[in-house]
Image (cartoon, rainbow, N blue to C red):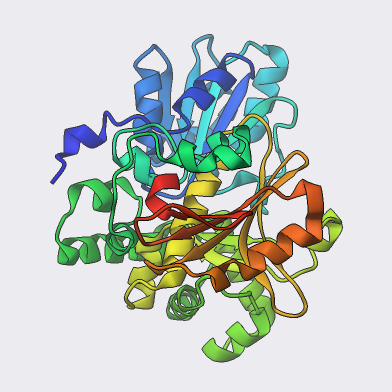
Amino acid sequence: MIIIHVMNTLPRLVDQAVAARLRVMPAVVLTGARQTGKSTLVGQLDAGGRRYRTLDDFDVRQAARRDPMALVGGADPLTIDEVQREPRLLSAVKRAIDLDRRPGRFLLTGSANLLLMRQVNESLAGRASYLTLWPMTRREQQGLATAGRWGDLLATPDHAWRDLLATGDHREEDWQALAQRGGFPTPALELDAPTDRTIWFEGYVRTWLERDLQDLASIGALPDFRRLMQATALRLGQLLNQTELGRDVGLPQPTVHRWLNLLETSHLLVRLPAYAVNRTKRLIKSPRVFWADTGVALHLARSAPGGAHLENIVLHDLLAWRDAQLERVEVTYWRTAAGEEVDFVIEAGASLIPVEVKATAQPRLGDCAHLRTFRQEYGTHARAGLLLHAGRHTEWLAPDVLAVPWWRVV
């Protein structure tokens, strides 16, 4: 068992990204789900002389409503935690920045994606840089401030991937155990017993439903909302059909649509778009639905880990890596009308890396079929395919598909 003070000193993937942006931009906005470690991260930065205010404090929240300019004024850099609890404060931050555009003046954190909140009418465009703090990646839990080896793969010729992935500090791990503990620091690092984690996840879901959700929207039918969360968790990795989902839980489609938006705004739900050469079509095709944390998803579904949860582990790692990059990378999935599908497509510039995930210890040539179809479809833009599996062997199953244990990459 890892003791509590260790958690507080573990480096995070976005540490350097936050520091780099504070050197350039007047404001940095760091958002992520509750309990991902935002307060711990900004607390380490505040040790360097930043003032700290949290809108979880009732008196601070009242001050933000009465005289927001007084709260954000002053020459010293300021951190405001849980800023989504008083969205109008962003207008005061904007005015303060327009009077003094020194870099690093404001570090704002929130448990909701401010850009998706209806109540937010000030985006701080041109004044702020936005970052997301995801639940801890597997390598962050090991004390490494990294995600998987996605950047190394992009920078390495395909034929050298096998040798690349044979190097490094790889620790074989049971993916089912990782799925059950998830990436929130407390259950991932401090709680070993499944019953203890169950207690924590139950408290987390109830607190979010009864308090945090009410900051975003007035929801009276909390049992209905929880049923929708459970039904969505049971459809992990599937195409999202809101009409069908609503029929199963007895809710109209517009309500399902609105409530799923709230889950996404809270950084709990992930809708993975489909890959298409025409980016407009990506908005039209049905997304696949995942959760930001597999531990929460399993708790809601009351089920054992399955192959979709291994996919979710890989996706979480990809998203955490993507959102810490300066150069924008897209992560999507690919599916044809005939039902051929590739779990994930990494799009970096003109390069495409198709990734398939199989919860088997013995991948076979047939598992490569859709990866090879994708490569034929996109020609020179498509790099070699990656088949991540639950076994131990790394081998070229086909000339253009490398089968590799998931833990050597993630």
Residue lying at 63% horizontally and 10% vertically, measured from the top left: 102
**Which residue in the rendered view is the most extreme toward the front?**
399
Which residue appears at 35% of the width and 71% of the height? Answer: 305
User: Quick check: 140 above or below 293?
Assistant: above
In the image, 386 versus 138, the foreground residue is: 386
- Please tell me which residue lies in front, 398 or 357: 398
Residue 308 versus residue 214 in the image, above or below? below
Q: What residue is drawn where x is 36% and y is 61%? A: 391
106 sits left or right of 286 in the view: left
Q: Position of residue 189 (x, y in %)?
A: 23, 46
Specify whether residue 58 is in view.
Answer: yes
* Observer able to see residue 82: no
Residue 67 location in percent, x, y? 56, 29
Q: Position of residue 333 (x, y in %)?
A: 66, 61
Does 232 appear above or below 376?
below
Tell me where residue 334 appears, x and y as whole percent.
70, 64
Residue 38 appears left or right of 282: left
Residue at 41% across / 49% down in the picture?
34
Q: Across the whole image, how many numbered discs are drawn on residues?
A: 0
Say whether residue 230 is left or right of residue 7.
Answer: right
